[in-house]
Image (spheres, rainbow, N blue to C red):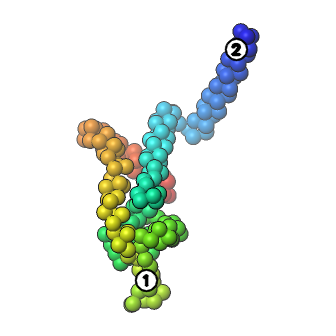
């Protein structure tokens, strides 16, 4: 039995060494002198992603963050075209169509042709959509509260450095 445990431990150690070697190779490839920064950033991104993917259930229907965010924008900007909604949410038209079709299937919105331009569909909330939008109005902000709380604990200099770093990352991602 002791031999088996030693063998298992050796296998685990070998796997761990391979994993660490792979991580080190990735870090060298990325030319990262402080790999813990990348690891922390990845943990933050994953946590935010988890918060945004946590659905809520209302009247036996499941709603996801993207649907609630779109519904909130529609409520505040209705009637709104899909193109304007995409611009407002800073997502693609295809993503808006996918999300609005889900909302349409759930009976939360309706799409009608514009009286001014028949090629444009305008989106408005149904009574059911209005009711749910009122129920969920704080949800997108609930996702951001823990982040805002943590940022509130930083001093001005820390916030400036943090913001500068985020701006650089965004610039690299968008260029």
Provide the residue designation for mark 1. 112
User: Which SS class for mark 2?
Assistant: helix
Looking at the image, which residue is at 45% across and 53% down? 55
- Using a 10 Å C-alpha cutoff, classify the residue at mark 1 as few (fewer than 14 neighbours), some (14 to 19) or many (20 or more): few
Q: Which mark is residue 5?
A: 2
Residue 170 seen anywhere in this rendered image of the structure: no
Question: Which quarter of the picture shows residue 148?
Answer: top left
- Residue 58 placement, left or right of 152: right
Say left or right for 128 vs 103: left
On the image, which quarter does residue 4 sit in? top right
Residue at image location 45% in from the left, 75% down from the top = 82
Q: Is 49 placed above or below 94 here?
A: above
Whole-percent x and y of residue 53?
Answer: 47, 51
Is residue 86 or residue 26 the one in the foreground?
A: 86
Q: Is residue 119 visible?
A: yes
In the structure shown, which secondary structural element does the residue marked by tag 1 occupy? strand
Place of residue 100 in the rendered image (x, y in percent of width and height, measured from the top left): 47, 70
> Does 101 sit left or right of 146 as displayed?
right
């Amino acid at each position: 039995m002791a031999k088996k445990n030693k063998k298992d431990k050796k296998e685990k150690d070998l796997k761990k060494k391979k994993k660490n070697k792979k991580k080190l190779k990735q870090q060298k490839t990325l030319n990262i002198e402080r790999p813990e920064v990348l690891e922390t950033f990845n943990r933050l991104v994953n946590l935010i992603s988890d918060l945004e993917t946590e659905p809520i259930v209302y009247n036996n229907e499941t709603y996801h963050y993207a649907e609630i965010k779109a519904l909130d924008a529609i409520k505040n900007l209705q009637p709104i075209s899909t193109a304007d909604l995409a611009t407002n949410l800073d997502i693609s038209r295809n993503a808006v169509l996918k999300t609005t079709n889900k909302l349409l299937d759930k009976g939360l919105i309706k799409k009608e042709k514009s009286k001014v331009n028949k090629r444009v569909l305008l989106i408005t909330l149904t009574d059911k959509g209005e009711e749910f939008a009122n129920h969920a109005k704080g949800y997108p902000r609930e996702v951001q509260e823990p982040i805002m709380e943590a940022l509130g604990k930083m001093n001005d200099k820390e916030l400036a450095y943090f913001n500068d770093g985020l701006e650089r990352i965004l610039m690299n991602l968008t260029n």
